[in-house]
Structures are given as C-alpha cells and as structure tokens.
Amino acid sequence: MKRIVAAGVSAVFAVAFGLGSAQAADKKVLAFVVNGASDFWKIAEAGVKKAQGELPKYDLQFKYPEQAAAAVQQRILDDLVAAGAAGIMVSAVDPKNETEELNKIASQSVLFTTDSDAPQSKRVAYIGSSNTDLGKEAGKLMLKALPNGGKCVGFVGLPGADNARERIEGVKEAIKGSKVELTDVRGDEIDQTRAKRNVEDVLAANPDVSCLVGFYSYNTPRIYEVLKEAGKLNKIKVIGFDEDPITLGGVKEGAIVGTVVQQPFEWGYQGMKLMAKYIEGDKSGVPANGIIIVPGKVIEKANVDEFMNQMKQMLKK
C-alpha cells in the first residue's frame, strides 16, 4: 500500500498514479481517506479498486494519513479539495472536533463519511456499519464465553471516534444486568507499540481479568501476541472486531472466542459508485436520514473457514 501525499495540482495526482496529465485532466477525482495506517483498510481499498473498473470517467484514490491525528487527516482533505477533488469519503478521526473543518470540505466537495461518522457535519451520507449493533454482538459473545460472569478490559485506537464510542456503548448495553463487567477501556491512538504495551500493563495489574476485548482491527492481534508470550492463551477469553489474519487464525484454533466483522469492501465499492451517481445528479441512492447501514457478521470457529475463503476471493478482485 502506497502512501501518496496529495499536492496542489491535478497533474501531480496523475503522475503519482501513472496517468498522463491530459488523461487525468478529463477525470474527476473521488478519494477515500482513512483514519490511520492499518491492514484493515486493505479490504476497503480492494472495494475501491473494483469500483474503479466500473467508473472509467473517474480517478479513484485511496489515502492513508501518516499519523492517526485529526490535523494530519485535515491536511490530506485540504490538499484534495485544493486539487479539485469532486468527492471525498472519510473515516473521521475526531468527529466532534473536526466538524467545522469537515463543513469547509463539504462546502467545496461532495462529502461522505464511512466507518466513523460525523453526524453533526454537513456530510451527504454515512455508509458503513451500525457500530452500536456491532458492539451488542460482541457483548453477546462475552456473555456466551463467561456464563458465570467475569471482569473484562477493552482496547481501542481512538476513544473519541464515533465508531469506538458506539461499539463500547453497544457492549455495555448487551451485558447490562449480567455478571460480566467491562471495567476499563485503554486507548492507544493507533500506535501498535502502545497497543501491545496496554495489554501487557493490564495483565500485570489485573491478575483476575477474565476476558480481553479488541475494539479495533489490530487490537485483537496484539492481545493474542501478548497472551501467547505470557503462556495465557486459552486461559483468558478473547473477543475481537474485524478480520485481521491473526484474529481469524486465533478463532480457527479456538484461542479467540469470536470476532465481529464489518464489510469494508462494500464501503469502498458501494460508496464510490454512490458518490459518482450523486455527483452526476442521481440522488436516489441517498436515504432521507443520510445513513446507509452495511450489516456486520459474527465469526466463530464454526464459520471461520468459510469466511476466510470468502476473504481470499474478495482480495483477489
């Protein structure tokens, strides 16, 4: 995955993506801007790639900020607008504090959100998961894994992002009134080293912890690695989100109870096509409430092989 920093003129985009300047000048740019570097986004990128094959009049671009920070993401958005991008889809790093800046983007380009919404902004639509529902599914896995109750600790990248907040709320709603507790959630700002250290710190400080929950795609692999190094795999229950290969491998071998996955491929594929139609004047695909939910799935040992085969086929496209 290449990180390409947008410059101020369309010709630079053309060179970066191997297009002639004349060819690029004829194409409108649609961009997908993520919240940080993570293998999770490879799946969405595959969806964008498929959409590119069906949208020859457009130049579809995928952007990774070098740091998971609102200011860095905003710079990418500003550069895209300065270069004349017709449409931008973004997973907002900090929606509450980014709203004013996102509104500036929306005044100059068609703005969609995905993964983590910015509902107070002037975005046209959100396409992605119901993170509250995903959290509820994870809560059900926790209840199933701990029928007699227990203390759980969660780990997440950006605690202030809507996707994180809603997943945590969903978990709490699902386990409310039970003997299963979510006692703490540690943030890491999408820093892999810090993510792993958070797990190590929790194990050292909480010898009675019963389960660990990875709320972002890379959190569960870091949990798995720490438990393996500590000789505690299968002794502490693990519940995850998303489809990282380490997570799926852990589900397959039984070391991870299950993982709640999304469909980021569809965010990229459907999102780009919908944005193109909207730009062309066809607004029929955007509902009145501006929210398009792509349902998630619960992956456990019984269906992990089938899901992994589906993933392989999807990433070939």
Image (spheres, helix red, strand yellow):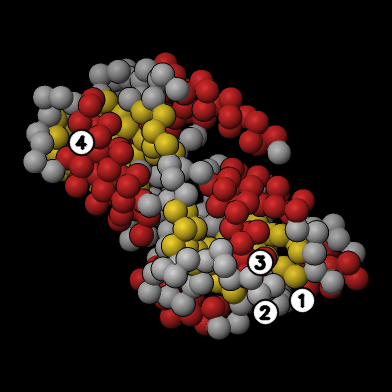
Mark 4 and mark 1: Cα distance apart in space: 50 Å
Q: Residues within 10 Å of mark 3 (few under 14, many from 20)?
A: some
Mark 3 and mark 4: Cα distance apart in space: 45 Å
Q: Earlier in the sequence, mark 3 or mark 4?
A: 4
Q: Vertically, is 170 above or below 67? A: above
Q: Are marks 1 and 3 in contact (CB under 8 Å)?
A: no
The residue sitting at 71% across, 39% down in the picture is: 317
Q: Are marks 3 and 4 in contact (CB under 8 Å)?
A: no
Q: Earlier in the sequence, mark 2 or mark 3?
A: 2
Identify the secondary structure beneath mark 3.
Answer: helix
Numbered label tally: 4
Mark 2 and mark 4: Cα distance apart in space: 46 Å
Query: Any mark on residue 277, and which?
Result: 3
Image spot of residue 310 (x, y percent): 58, 29
Q: Residue flagged by tag 1: what amino acid is it?
A: Val
Q: Residues within 10 Å of mark 4 (few under 14, many from 20)?
A: many
Query: Any mark on residue 84, and which?
Result: none
Q: Comparing marks 3 and 4, which lies closer to the viewer? A: 3
Image spot of residue 170 (x, y percent): 26, 48
Image spot of residue 16 (x, y percent): 79, 60
Q: Residue flagged by tag 2: what amino acid is it?
A: Ala
The residue sitting at 13% across, 43% down in the picture is: 176
Q: Residues within 10 Å of mark 2 (few under 14, many from 20)?
A: some
Residue for badge 1: 9
Mark 2 and mark 3: Cα distance apart in space: 22 Å
Identify the secondary structure beneath mark 1.
Answer: loop
